[in-house]
Image (cartoon, rainbow, N blue to C red):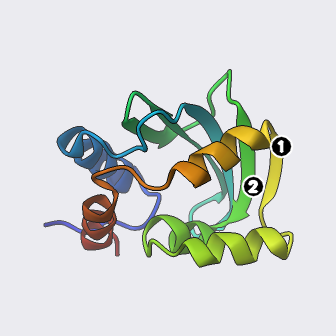
Amino acid sequence: MAKHPFLSDGWFDEVRRLHEAAGGAAPEGTEIRMNLMITATPFDGDLAMHMAAADGRADWGKGHLDDADVTLTLAYDTARAIFVDGNPQAAIEAFMAGRIIVQGDITKLMVMQAAGPGAAASQLTRSLQEITE
């Protein structure tokens, strides 16, 4: 399996393929449209991306959604620890230290967090680790 740099175009292509194959990669009953601004990337500065969950399905992609519920700003290394390493403690620590900035409907984010991972989340995390340099 080919490996791609985290948040590169090839990585996003593989993530979309993995999500389609996994099906229930998002917590059931959770609906959120979230924009993320990833700072200090090894690419050309900051990267705008989005994550959405509805009907137990997840969608990740480049660019921001027009009608996002919430926007998070966080550093590249924090995003990698959360999404690729599957380290929820990294998110908590970064948030408490002010390294994750939240704008918008924080209750949607809290509902998603309380719902826990979707049925396919652990396999998806392993797959993300396999495709990420």
Q: Is residue 77 visible?
A: no
Q: Residue furthest left?
A: 1
Q: Which is more toward the observer, 46 or 54?
A: 54
Image vertical order of residue 86 relative to residue 38, above or below: below
Q: Which is more toward the observer, 65 or 22?
A: 22
Q: Alpha-carbon neighbours of circle 2 within 10 Å: few (<14), some, or many (≥20)?
A: some
Q: Is residue 88 visible?
A: yes
Mark 2 / mark 1, whichever is N-terminal = 2
Q: Could you say where residue 87 lies in the image, as x and y percent from the top left?
A: 51, 75
Q: Which residue is mark 1?
A: 103
Q: Which residue is mark 2?
A: 73
Identify which amino acid the numbered label 1 is placed on: Gln
Q: Which is more toward the observer, 105 or 40?
A: 105
Q: CA distance from mark 2 to mark 1?
A: 9 Å
Quarter of the picture containing the N terminus is bottom left
Q: Could you say where residue 6 lies in the image, as x and y percent from the top left?
A: 44, 65
Task: Residue 48: give its label.
Answer: none
Residue appearing at x 59%, y 53% in the figure: 114
Of circles 2 and 1, which is in front? 1
Q: Could you say where residue 105 lies in the image, as x and y percent from the top left?
A: 78, 36
Labels 2 and 1 touching (C-beta < 8 A): yes
Image vertical order of residue 45 relative to residue 115, above or below: below
Quarter of the picture containing the C terminus is bottom left
Snapshot quadrant of residue 79: bottom right
Q: Alpha-carbon neighbours of circle 1 within 10 Å: few (<14), some, or many (≥20)?
A: few
